[in-house]
Each structure stands twice: as C-alpha cells, then as structure tokens.
C-alpha cells in the first residue's frame, strides 16, 4: 500500500479546477471544459506518465521535464501538460471590465505603457499565430514582461522565461463555442482572467 501511494505521488497529476465546469460561461462553455480539460488534458497527462515511466525523467516535476526534454513526444506532452495546467488555473467567473491590480498591473504598465496597449499587443500575437500554439505573457530575468508566440506545445520556460499567462489558440480550445472565430474567443477571454493568480506567478 505504501509503495502504491509513493508511485502515485511521483506521477504527474491533473490540476484541480478552482471553479465549477460551467463557471466560465458564456466565455468558455461547460461542454468545452469537459472536452478540453476532461479529455485533452487528461490524455496529455496519461501519455506523459506512460512515456517517462522507467526513465530518468520519472519523478521529476513537469517544469523540469519541459526544460530538459528533447523535441519529440515527451516534450510535446510535457509542454501541453504544463501549458494547460497554467491555462485552466488562471481563470475565474466572467467580470465585465476585468483589469489587473497591484504588482501585475504595475509591471504591465512599466513594460507596455498601459493595459490597453498590452491587450492590443497580446491579442495581435494570439490572433496572428499561424496554426496551433499559444500566446504567452512572461517575465524575463530582469523582471520585464514580454509577449511571445509558441507553436504547438511550446512553453517560454525553454527560453529561460517565467510564464505568467497563456492563451491556447489550438482550435479545440474554442471551436465548440466560436467555431473558427479565434479573434472573438480572444476578445472574450479577457473577462475571465484571474489577475490575482497571474500576479502570484511573478518572481
């Protein structure tokens, strides 16, 4: 029994949602949460655990794996596990006029001038990313905030950045609710960002 518990502890785990599956509606529907979180992310977690079983990566955190794994299946599934964990935990029920406060607001203003300029630049990055991938707000080694575009399962950790907020622009993230209207999805997501969570990720 003790060995079983130890093995379970060492496995990469699914993140627990801090809200009900329907709490993000109408921005993200319960149906999308059930598929995106319940099936897509679960598959990444399961596949990653199977791939690292019996290797030198077994027992390491998903962040450690993302940093060191070579390009290929392990990195792809580790990247998507980390990306989706950060993604799903950063949301809350919709709030009209949702804006950051405190330290994260100050950092955004310092790096981009003001929140509206940041939103415009981030939205452009998310909308213009070709194919599947992610748009990220990250913090560099000096503390400055930067926006990056990562194809497929890429994560800013690979470039020495600290990821703070990521928006998934794979079609499975929004197709059930918005079909092919990626810009509409990005415009709506701002209402559900939990800026307190994002701020706590700053170093």
Image: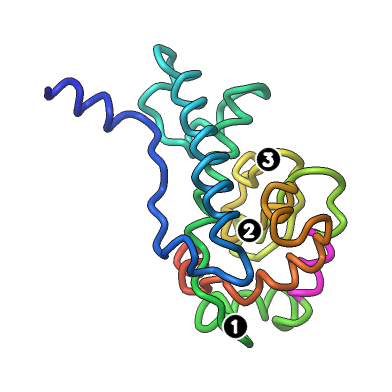
- Which residue does the numbered mark 2 point to in the structure image? 138
Q: Position of residue 157 (x, y in %)?
A: 60, 44
The residue wearing badge 1 is 98
User: Is residue 47 or residue 34 the one in the foreground?
Assistant: 34
Quarter in which the N terminus is drawn: top left
Q: Element at badge 1?
A: loop
**Can I make out residue 203 in this image?**
no
**Which residue is located at x 52 percent, y 50 percent?**
34
Check the image and report above or below for 109 versus 11. below
Count of numbered labels shown in the rendering: 3
The mark lying in front, picked from 1 and 3, is 1
Q: Is residue 125 magenta?
A: yes
Q: For residue 126, which numbered disc appears in the image?
A: none
What distance separates the C-alpha of mark 1 from that of mark 3? 27 Å
Q: Residue furthest bottom?
A: 97
SS category of the residue bearing label 2: strand
Q: Position of residue 48 (x, y in %)?
A: 50, 26
Rendered position, 200 above or below 6: below
Q: Earlier in the sequence, mark 1 or mark 3?
A: 1
Q: Are marks 1 and 3 in contact (CB under 8 Å)?
A: no
Query: Toward which corner of the image does residue 150 lie, by quadrant?
Result: top right
For marks 2 and 3, the one nearer the N-term is: 2
Query: Circle 3 sits in a helix, a strand or a loop, which is it?
Result: loop
| Left or right, residue 72 beside residue 44 | right
Give the main secondary structure, helix, strand or loop, of the magenta stretch: helix
Residue 54: x %, y % from top left: 40, 12
- Image height of 15 relative to 108, above or below: above
| CA neighbours of label 1 inside 10 A, class few (<14), some (14 to 19), many (20+) | few
Q: From where the camera sits, is residue 199 visible?
A: yes
Provide the residue span drawn in magenta.
118-126
Residue at the image position 68 percent from the left and 40 percent from the top: 154
Nearest to the observer: residue 11 or residue 170: 170
């Amino acid at each position: 029994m003790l060995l079983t518990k130890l093995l379970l502890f060492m496995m990469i785990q699914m993140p627990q949602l801090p809200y009900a599956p329907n709490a993000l509606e109408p921005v993200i529907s319960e149906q999308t949460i059930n598929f995106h979180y319940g099936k897509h992310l679960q598959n990444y977690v399961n596949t990653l655990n199977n791939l690292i079983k019996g290797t030198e990566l077994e027992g390491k955190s998903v962040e450690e794996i993302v940093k060191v794994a070579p390009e290929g299946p392990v990195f792809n599934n580790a990247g998507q596990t980390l990306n989706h964990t950060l993604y799903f935990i950063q949301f809350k029920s919709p709030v009209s006029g949702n804006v950051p406060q405190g330290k994260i607001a100050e950092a955004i203003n310092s790096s981009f001038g003001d929140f509206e300029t940041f939103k415009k630049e981030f939205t452009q990055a998310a909308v213009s990313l070709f194919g599947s991938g992610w748009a990220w707000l990250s913090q560099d080694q000096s503390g400055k905030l930067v926006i990056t575009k990562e194809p497929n399962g890429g994560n800013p950790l690979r470039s020495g950045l600290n990821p703070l907020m990521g928006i998934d622009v794979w079609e499975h993230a929004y197709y059930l609710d918005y079909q092919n209207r990626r810009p509409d999805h990005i415009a709506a997501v701002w209402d559900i960002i939990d800026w307190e969570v994002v701020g706590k990720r700053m170093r």
